[in-house]
Amino acid sequence: MSINKLTVQSIEAQAQSLLDMAQRDRNDYESAVKLIMSCTGKLVFTGMGKSGIIARKLAATYSSTGVASFFVHPGEAYHGDLGMIEENDLIFAFSNSGETPELMKLLKYSRTQHVIAVTNSHQSALASLSTVHLECKVDKEICPLNLAPTTSTTAALVMGDAICASVMELSKFSENDFAQFHPGGTLGKSLLTKARDLMTTQVPFVQQTDQLHDVLLKISEGRLGLVCVGNNTHVQGVITDGDIRRAIAQSSRPSSLTAAEIATSSPVFIEESLGLNEMTILFQEKKIVSILVGSKTSLKGVVQFYDLHKM
């Protein structure tokens, strides 16, 4: 069997295991979600080994969606970090076997008794110590020896992410909320950047009776590839390079064309608060390169397609 086929086969096997697990799932996710949403403290993720890595990733995910979360290593907790866990906190513990000694010690000495546990059996020791237990059991690891945590860790991650998605949905976590927790990098900029941040406020104008020659001069001076007809409080249309080419092609006397004859009378306007993603979609749908910001009676500026890529 080729390496490509073998790798794809492993991916398909993991996907099928997740589907099989979902079909026989009888977990009480409602109680788990309600515990998280009613928690007045922090959400404390914990786990040993590969389960700990999954727990650490989930702590980062929940924190980024507005749930105050952090990871505590079970071994370190037993040697001093228990002080980080307070009475009103909620522990979210991960252990495939549900018998991890370090986790047992953490729960025994923790100041909080509120625990969501994810293991492979409702009969596990960790399940008996939890407020809500979620069974996460797969038929087989994709490891050829059926030993290395592979499918089981994928399943635990998917379950944790799915619960997070439910919390987001029920708490009405918005795109604006998400942006507040992701101000840096490309993602943060795309969420926080608005039309007002990108628009050019110096917009060239011509009047309806101006000749083609005057229109061309104004477009060159403005360096935006367009001019508006009228003024800031009375926009009667817009003229782009494309409008000029089309008007010339259709006219028998191009030199006598006026701005009113060339202009598009119903240009596209957007609000100053429109986000970067929405602007990108609008440019693509309308197949245009310039959008006016404001309204016909209150023009604020112009955003052009290439401005979106200056971020």
Image (spheres, rainbow, N blue to C red):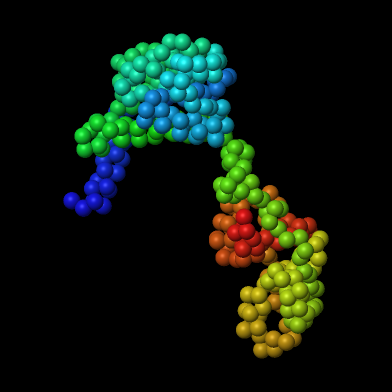
Measuring from the top left, give residue 12's x and y in whole percent.
28, 44
Q: Nearer the viewer, residue 147 or 191?
A: 147
Pick the front one: 254 or 132: 132
What residue lies at 73% left-to-right and 79% top-to-bottom? 216
Seen at 74% across and 81% down, the residue is 212
**Left or right of 134 in this view: 269:** right
Q: How many numbered markers are drawn?
A: 0
Residue sitting at 37 percent across and 28 percent down?
A: 49
Asked if 7 appears above or below 171 in the picture, the reply is: below
Q: Is residue 167 left or right of residue 196?
A: left
Nearer to the camera, 144 or 112: 144
Q: Quadrant of residue 309?
A: bottom right
Q: Nearer the viewer, residue 158 or 205?
A: 158
Instruction: Name the residue at the bottom extreme.
Output: 252
Image quadrant occupied by the C terminus: bottom right
Could you tell me if residue 189 is visible in this image?
yes
Residue at 35% from the left image edge and 19% from the top image edge: 100
x and y, in percent, of residue 102 in the image: 39, 17
Q: What percent of the width, then of the height, locates residue 198?
A: 68, 56
Considering only vertical position in the picture, is 198 above or below 72? below
Q: Quadrant of residue 97?
A: top left
* Residue 30, position as x, y percentages in the image: 44, 23
Is 194 rendered above or below residue 46? below
| Residue that protrudes farthest toward the front in the picture | 79
In this orientation, does residue 259 appear? no
Q: Is residue 309 left or right of 230 when viewed as pictured? A: left
Relative to 115, is 12 above or below? below
